[in-house]
Amino acid sequence: MSLIERAADKLSKNEIGNFIPGKAPQTVKTSFDPLFLSNNVPPGQKIAKEASASDSLATDSTNRASSSKKTTKKIEIDLENLHRKGIVTLDHSRSEIAEQFRLIKRPLIANAFNPDSGIKNGNLIMVTSSLSGEGKSFCSINLAMSIAMEMDHRVLLVDADVARPSIPASLGFSPEEPGLLDLLRDPQWKIPDVMMKTNVKKLTLIPAGRRHAHATELLASQSMHSILAELAHRYHDRVVIFDSPPLLLTSEARVLAGQMGQIVLVVEAERTTQQTVKEALQQIEACDVINLIYNKARAHSGGGYYGYGYY
Ligand SMILES: Nc1ncnc2c1ncn2[C@@H]1O[C@H](COP(=O)(O)OP(=O)(O)OP(=O)(O)O)[C@@H](O)[C@H]1O
Ligand SMILES: [Mg+2]
């Protein structure tokens, strides 16, 4: 049975039924054991999908060209607001979601920093999914917050969903901030020029940058190779998390996947079919380390959520 078939099989109903809440499967190189993430919308609270930040992106090229470069800008993340959206925050470090991301981050960090892992560019972690709305941005931000807030490692969260960036709306900054696309199209821009510090000490952001008609080509360019090499080597002490577009709906995600040390594939429970997951896995076959997150999962018996009553 191929790796892809094994992975898809793990997502079959029987395997899910055998999952023990709170017990993380071992992740080894080329692991397809899925980690489970419950639907974390607090009871009685409906979390609306953020309006696409790209809706408000300016397309006026004069406007874009007139912006000047900035260095080490700092943004103030509204942590209480983030908590209301179901994101891990330090003040709520014993929450169910915080505990779930502790389990999710552990093998990723081990792969990134264990010199014996043999994983090339292990600190570059792409979060993607087959389709849209499966929870990539939710998981990227949670993973970044979880790692940064517990002071495990410094984290760089890169908004690589350049066509529909949603991190600005979630973390509260303008989608007009220069970022990845600016780095890619103008060699005068350097990584520190587009980094934004935050009030979470170990968390730094790189926004998607100002929209460009040839975003896919830019992501596939030699400049992107150089930027990723720099992130892997010069920033080797950081976990670099890329919130990415969906694999089956865009070509950007495939292009990026080929250059990542680890990939986290988010699979939305009760929506994404096994066949769809198989197709997505085929797109990222070249990556040695693929972790699955089975997201928005409900328990199969008792009607509760996975992880409920874990404490
Ligand atoms: N485990 C979860 N518990 C509760 N809400 C969740 C969970 N995962 C995702 N969501 C919610 O589902 C919606 C879609 O999630 P998100 O925006 O992260 O998906 P996405 O894959 O990044 O979408 P897109 O493809 O549009 O970028 C959001 O409102 C998010 O808050
Ligand atoms: Mg997203």
Image (cartoon, rainbow, N blue to C red):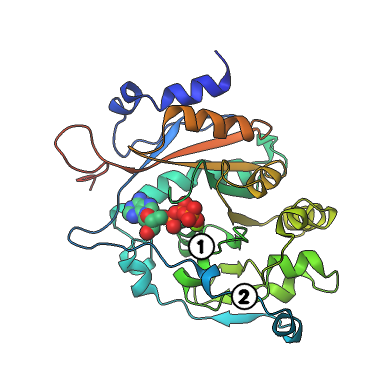
Label 2: how many Cα within 10 Å (few below 14, some 14–19, many 20+):
many
In the figure, is residue 288 to the left or right of 184?
left
Which residue was labeled with disc 1? 148
Q: Amino acid at mark 2?
A: Met
* Residue 138 in the image, given as x and y percentages of width and height: 43, 56
Front of the two marks 1 and 2: 2
Q: Is residue 185 above or below residue 23?
A: below
Secondary structure at badge 1 equals helix
Location of residue 158 in the rendering, given as x and y in whole percent from the top left corner = 61, 61
Seen at 18% across and 42% down, the residue is 304
301 vs 234, nearest the viewer: 301
Q: Nearer the viewer, residue 74 or 182?
A: 182
Q: Is residue 87 above or below residue 173?
A: above
Provide residue 261's location: percent of width, then percent of height.
67, 42
Residue depicted at x 31% and y 65%: 92
Which residue shows up at 67% across the image and 69% down it?
211
Helix, strand or loop at disc 2?
strand
- Gap between marks 1 and 2, in whole Å? 14 Å
Horizontal side of residue 287 vs 264, given as left or right: right
Disc 2 target residue: 196
Of residues 103 and 114, which is closer to you in this image?
103
